[in-house]
Image (spheres, grey):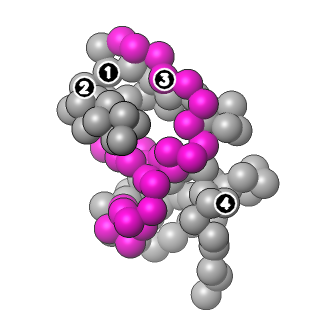
Amino acid sequence: FEFINSQEIVYCKADGNYTRVYLTDNSKRIFSRLLKETEALIESYRFCRIHKSYLINLDHLKKYKRGDGGSVKLSNGKLLPVSRHYKEFFLTKIKQ
């Protein structure tokens, strides 16, 4: 088992029956859980689902670019899409 501080997680990405977790030190870990299960474990922290494949740590959000769904830029420079389905939920979360 490995314990990871939630502040070290920049974002999570779905990968079939696994979740890839990208950390602040540019390393990544693979969990044998669905992204939905990972989301349930960390939902009380500052995480937000932005796409069926992505869950981001709002503390690492640097920029949101508007568009059909839009996109986000994270502290590690990664650009990720925001789906139309999750856009309103995401915008509500960042306004809180």
Q: In which quadrant of the rendered view does residue 73 lie?
A: top right
- Above or below: residue 52 compared with residue 37: above
Residue marked by disc 4: 8
Residue marked by disc 2: 84
Q: Residues within 10 Å of mark 3 (few under 14, many from 20)?
A: some
Q: Nearer the viewer, residue 88 or 35?
A: 88
Mark 4 vs mark 2, foreground winner is 4
Please, which residue is most extreme toward the right here? 25
Q: Which mark is residue 15?
A: none
Residue marked by disc 1: 69
Could you tell me if the residues under marks 3 and 4 are in contact, i.e. CB atoms within 8 Å?
no
Q: Nearer the viewer, residue 55 or 91?
A: 91
Residue marked by disc 3: 64
Q: Nearer the viewer, residue 82 or 28?
A: 82
Q: Which residues are magenta?
A: 39-67
Viewed as shown, does residue 46 lie left or right of 60? left
Q: Residue at x 32, y 31 (%)?
A: 91
Tell me which label, 4 or 1, sits earlier in the chain.
Answer: 4
Tell me which label, 4 or 2, sits earlier in the chain.
Answer: 4
Could you tell me if the residues under marks 3 and 2 are in contact, i.e. CB atoms within 8 Å?
no
Tell me which label, 3 or 4, sits earlier in the chain.
Answer: 4
Q: Residues within 10 Å of mark 1 (few under 14, many from 20)?
A: some
Circle 2 SS class: helix
Mark 3 vs mark 1, foreground winner is 3
Q: Position of residue 89 (x, y in %)?
A: 25, 38
Tell me which label, 2 or 1, sits earlier in the chain.
Answer: 1
